[in-house]
Amino acid sequence: MKLKPSMREKRRYLVFEVFSKKPVSGFNALSAIQREASSFMGSSGIAKSGFKPLSRMWSSNLQRGMIQVDRKYVEQAKASLCLTKKVGRQNAILRSVGVSGMINKAKERYLR
């Protein structure tokens, strides 16, 4: 069954940046964010928000990555970024760089 465009979930793509003393891997950063978002929003919040770290959208030279989230839950996703204090075994600061409604625009503007 195909859904009408008005009934589909409206996604946003949140680009974030990691600041740490040493470069971190994308897997470590995305798993730390997933863990913190899960503890902040809970299992049902993660399910409702459609929170999904996109592993193929990691820029190792810029230390930036992307998360897919429902448009109603962008602020909670940003809060979970701010609450993440460790990536892997090192201290890190995460900040939101920008939000876009189209994955190609987010990639073009913030990951290059």
Image (cartoon, rainbow, N blue to C red):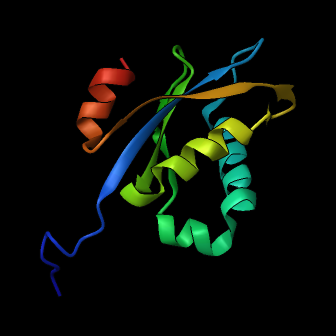
Q: Give the answer, above or below, for where 29 lies relative to 33.
A: above
Left or right: residue 43 compared with residue 90: left
For the residue pair 54 and 68, the one nearer the viewer reads as: 68
Q: Residue 110 lies in what quarter of the image?
A: top left
User: Residue, x 61% and y 33% (percent of image)?
Assistant: 26
Residue furthest to the right in view is 89
Q: Residue 93 lies in what quarter of the image?
A: top right
For the residue pair 3 and 22, the one nearer the viewer reads as: 3
Residue 78 point in image, percent of width and height: 56, 42
For residue 17, say whether it is visible: yes
Left or right: residue 46 compared with residue 103: right
User: Residue, x 29% and y 41% (percent of image)?
Assistant: 103
Residue furthest to the bottom in view is 1
Residue 53 point in image, percent of width and height: 53, 48
Q: Give the answer, above or below, for where 98 lies relative to 35.
A: above
Left or right: residue 10 compared with residue 88: left
User: Residue, x 87% and y 31% (percent of image)?
Assistant: 89
For residue 30, say whether it is visible: no
Q: Residue 14 lies in what quarter of the image?
A: top left
